[in-house]
Image: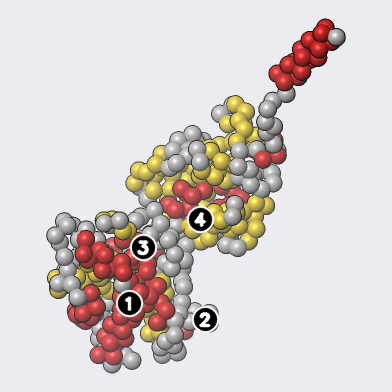
Amino acid sequence: MKRWLSLLMVIMLCFSLTVPATQVDASSRVTVVYKGKTKSFSGKKTYSYVNNSKIKLSKQPIFMKNGSYMGPVNKLFKKSSLKVSVKSSGNILTLQYRSNIIVLKNGSRNITVNGQSDRMNAPAMLVTYPSGKTKWVVPLKSVCSRLGITYKLKNGVIKMKGAVNSATTSSSSSSNNNSAAENGQITLVLDAGHGGMDSGATGNGYREKNMTLSILLGAKRMFDNDSRFKVYYTRTSDSYPSLTDRSNLANNYDADLFVSIHINSASASAHGTETLYNSSRNTVTAKDGMTSRELASYIQRAVVSTTGFTNRGLKNRTDLSVLNRTKMPACLIEYGFISNTKEAREMNANTTRYGQELYQAIVGYLQSEGKL
């Protein structure tokens, strides 16, 4: 009897050594060949959404590396509605979306964004899927933020949308570039500074890009209900339209005015509101009797009244892209200093009101010029 018990224990011990304690579900993993070696990655996803359209990825699934979801470039960027320009030469991949250009290298987390060096969470990779197809895969969140494409992961589903910088209008009807003028509307471009990968100034726990967007959205709520305006917004989400995209939007739609929203930063003691314009462009951008300086002067008075901060006056800036490239009266508002504890707190608490009163200021300026 003891001999049989001993034999049974030996059999059970052998079985426990040959069967793993936890089983790995192979269907949830993606196997690829990378740099000549077979690799297996978790986080398999066989579809994604691009501009609300479902993209099936059963043959080139998404997988996770270094905590980042890696997706196939051709399927998600080039062949989708995003229509990203994709160029590959050896180990170098170049992507262009609108005016944003990024350059990546196989196996490297380094990336060049519009000529500036940056670093991603995971490397770009040239991989061969089981189908035998060799494809570029890239960390989706890192690449989207740098191209100006919105990336969201919600309930395990990845959704990508083109940056809202071609035209988000306050009118629900579609129209060509001249329809606003034909309808007697004022065409306006509002720009929320920074966004996406570019946080702008930071201080006291706040980010400039969030404040500027919130101010813009406060203004948008007012313009949406005013049929006298056709308004285009460089962004209405946490995306990054390039500086060229911002000015091109205004120029392409022959806007009457361009207003850019920003938050200042310097020392902790710096304070006050200022508005920037470009004196060298004041004459050439004059339109229907309106000039950048007049616009900036009116907006400055109105915004100082809104914030209650010190009036720092107008600042002549000839070095800013959006003031250099726009072809209509343009100004850039610096509401206050994010580096100043009191002003940062005040601004963050009142962004919606600031936006509503910016709408009133623009209406007031146009009325003073006899345009409304």
Instruction: Identify the element where label 1 is drawn.
Output: helix
**Which x, y percent locates residue 322?**
30, 66
Mark 2 vs mark 1, CA separation in Å: 24 Å
Q: Is residue 38 above or below residue 356?
A: above
Q: Residue at x 15, y 61 (%)?
A: 270
Quadrant hosting residue 240: bottom left
The structure residue drawn at horizontal position 25% and vertical position 90%, both measured from the top left corner, is 368
Q: Amino acid at mark 4?
A: Tyr
Looking at numbered disc 1 in the image, what kind of residue is underneath it?
Arg
Report helix, strand or loop for mark 3.
helix
Label 4: which secondary element: strand
Q: In the drawing, what numbered circle is on residue 307? A: none
Q: In the picture, which quadrant includes the N terminus?
A: top right
Residue nearer the viewer, 8 or 340:
8
Q: Horizontal placement of 285 versus 42: left or right?
A: left
Look at the picture and state if 70 lies above or below 150.
above
Judged from the image, the secondary structure of the residue bearing numbered disc 2 is loop
Which numbered mark, 4 or 2, is in the foreground of this view?
Answer: 4
Pointer 4 with pointer 2, Cβ within 8 A = no
Q: Residues within 10 Å of mark 4 (few under 14, many from 20)?
A: many
Report the residue marked by disc 2.
172
Residue 76 is situated, as x and y percent measured from the top left of the image, at 58, 52
Front position in the image: 174 or 283: 174
